[in-house]
Amino acid sequence: EADIYQTPRYLVIGTGKKITLECSQTMGHDKMYWYQQDPGMELHLIHYSYGVNSTEKGDLSSESTVSRIRTEHFPLTLESARPSHTSQYLCASSEVFKGAGLDKNIQYFGAGTRLSVL
Amino acid sequence: KNQVEQSPQSLIILEGKNCTLQCNYTVSPFSNLRWYKQDTGRGPVSLTIMTFSENTKSNGRYTATLDADTKQSSLHITASQLSDSASYICVVSDRGSTLGRLYFGRGTQLTVWP
């Protein structure tokens, strides 16, 4: 069982509100990720971090921002939420298993935050 | 273009029956392939992970196979249970970057009926 936690699990807010989705992991992983997933669709990487003070944009353009001040904490912020931001947001962290010349990057996911913007 | 395609999109089976889910990928250079189970409203949970040198990997009633030559993988579920109802996602990682970029399929939605 992975020790990665997301809060809140569900959030319904009005347009224009500022929100922060929390993600914490207690496994000491350096790499952390945020994914966006619409129903029945694949996960899309929106942000990732290699470690403290490192953040990068992912494959899918997102108006959200992230920060990584501490290893265990990787919050995502929307300054002004819109209905188009309605989606599920999944946080993940990863460790790398090295062996036989190949690395296995194992990602552990949180339970997700389901966001609805009215 | 790196892609992961899964079939079928959805599947309904009776409890106790077996089923096989398919995954085809074009990701290159290939690093590893993993199957995740995602319950509704939850985050994905890893079932198996295989590198190109591994042809099969089991995890209880789940058995994954990999053919790196044809770039195909399958997930076989034996003696299905109601709790197997979930989306099963095939994920392929490349070796092209230190990030180990992941490519996600859209998943197969499995429903097990009593």
Image (cartoon, coloured by chain):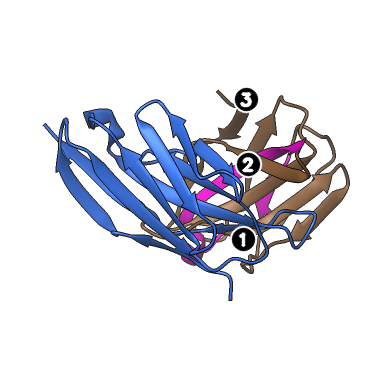
Chain colours: A brown, B blue
The numbered dot on residue A9 is: none
The numbered dot on residue A92 is: 2
- The amino acid on which the numbered mark 2 sits, given as a three-letter code, is Ala
Q: Secondary structure at mark 2?
A: strand
Residue A79 highlighted magenta (yes or no): yes
Q: Nearer the viewer, residue B99 or B78?
A: B78
The answer to whether dots 2 and 1 both sit on one chain is: yes
Q: Secondary structure at mark 3?
A: loop
Mark positioned earlier in the residue sequence (1 or 3): 3
Residue B47, placed above or below residue A77: above
The numbered dot on residue A3 is: 3
Determine whether label 2 and label 1 are within 8 Å by CB.
no
Write the start and end of the magenta stretch as one range.
A74-99
- The amino acid on which the numbered mark 1 sits, given as a three-letter code, is Ser
Q: Point out residue B46 in the picture as x, y percentages from the top left corner.
A: 51, 37
Q: Point out residue B29 in the picture as x, y percentages from the top left corner.
A: 68, 64
* Residue sitting at x 48%, y 50%: B66
Left or right: residue A92 versus residue A40 is right
Q: Which residue is mark 1?
A: A80
Residue B29 appearing in the image = yes
Q: Main secondary structure of the magenta part?
A: strand
* Residue sitting at x 64%, y 67%: B28
Q: Point out residue B32 in the picture as x, y percentages from the top left corner.
A: 61, 50
Image quarter where the N terminus of chain B lies is bottom right
Which chain does tag 1 point to?
A: A
Mark positioned earlier in the residue sequence (2 or 1): 1
The answer to whether dots 1 and 3 both sit on one chain is: yes
Which chain does tag 3 point to?
A: A
Question: Crowdedness of circle 1 by 10 Å Cα count: few (<14), some, many (20+)?
Answer: some
Residue B47 highlighted magenta (yes or no): no
